Amino acid sequence: MAKRLGRRYFCQPADMLAEDLVGKLLCRKVDDEILRYRIMETECYYGEEDTACHASKGKTERTKILYEKGGTAYIYICYGMHFLFNVVTGREGHPEAVLIRGITGYNGPGKLTRIMKINKELNGEDMVNSDRLWIEDDGCRFPIRTDKRVGIDYATPEYRDILWRYIADDGEYRPAK
């Protein structure tokens, strides 16, 4: 039986949760249907010191959600056309989040938000109490492989090369390049 993840879980640091979220179920209620897809790939973004993190320049109107309590949805538009979905983690006041990069059947953060109908309307959603967006754990675990994060050429070498991308190594899932 799947169990909904609570506040205590999400208040852990992103560098721990990014790996642990692989295998969990991302759930989205649309009308009367509940969509459930297994998370297969994530990336960690951790603090103002992480030059790939949106909060690296400090708190702004766009990034203020990253400073919220763990379990808050951070959704932004990329390249003017793709919504990307992150789960804010850690303690309130410290900007960190886990980008959900892939789910079963859909490799790429823009594809998963399209199929799950996740958009800017859900930015700031409290996933602990929401009836529209949440994450469940049914005990599924995968071997995990790590890699560099994608699309962050602007970051300093230290943060560009860190292995904060976590991918289910199940023999079937193929991450987007």
Image (cartoon, rainbow, N blue to C red):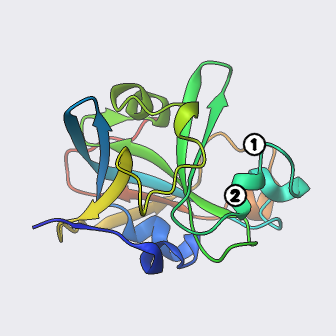
Is 147 above or below relative to 82? below
1 or 2: tag closer to the N-terminus: 2
Where is residue 9 drawn, in percent x and y?
Answer: 43, 77
The residue carrying mark 1 is 153
Q: Is residue 106 above or below residue 53?
A: above
Q: Residue at x 64, y 29 (%)?
A: 77
**Disc 2 crowd, CA 10 A, few/some/many (<14, 14-19, 20+):** many
Which element is circle 2 on? Answer: helix
Query: Along the horizontal axis of the image, is 20 left or right of 97?
Result: left
Q: Quadrant of the N terminus?
A: bottom left
Q: Amino acid at mark 1?
A: Asp
* Viewer-side residue, 144 vs 72: 72
Does the rendering let one see residue 53?
A: no
Q: Amino acid at mark 2?
A: Leu
Q: Which residue is mark 2?
A: 66
The quadrant holding residue 69 is bottom right
The image position of residue 60, as x and y in percent, is 87, 49
User: CB of mark 1 within 8 Å of CB of mark 2?
Assistant: no
Q: Secondary structure at mark 1?
A: loop
